[in-house]
Image (cartoon, helix red, strand yellow):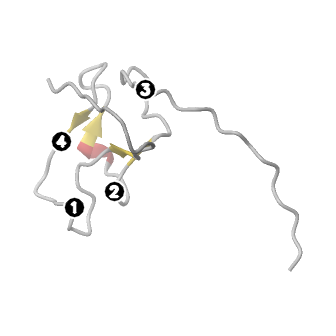
Amino acid sequence: MQAETLPSYAWPKEDARDDFDEPGLRFCWNFLRNPDAASWSLSTRPGWLRLYGSALTLNDLASPAFVGRCQEHFACLVTLRVG
């Protein structure tokens, strides 16, 4: 089957640091399965990502409280502040 290809698009590089000061999560953040909006918040404490834990685990079919980001490099230093 012949088909035209879509034009190339260079996605802008995501900033490595996130201060969680936007009204929503940036595109680089991801969830496990279908995210439960009640399991996380950016507005409860502005400038922080708050996760609300539950009895669900990563092995359950439902959506546990999980927000992650894909590792882009083999050699990296990752830090976070828990408060």
Q: Secondary structure at mark 4?
A: loop
Badge 3, how many Cα within 10 Å: few under 14, some, many 20+?
A: few
Distance of label 3 from label 2 (alpha carbons): 21 Å
Tag nearer the camera, 1 or 4: 1
Question: Residue 52: which disc?
Answer: 4
Mark 2 near mark 1, Cβ–Cβ under 8 Å?
A: yes
**Residue 55 higher or lower than 76, as above or below:** below
Q: Label 1, label 3: how many angstroms apart (C-alpha)?
A: 26 Å
Q: Residue furthest bottom?
A: 1
For mark 2, give the secondary structure.
loop
Instruction: Give the side of residue 65 with respect to residue 54, left or right.
Output: right
Which of marks 1 and 2 precedes in the sequence? 2
Contact check, label 4 and label 2, Cβ < 8 Å: no
Q: Is residue 76 left or right of residue 52?
A: right
The residue singled out by tag 3 in the image is 23
Q: CA distance from mark 2 to mark 1?
A: 8 Å
Q: Which numbered disc, 1 or 4, marks the residue that appears first in the sequence?
A: 4
What residue is shown with label 2?
32
Labels 1 and 3: the sequence-earlier one = 3
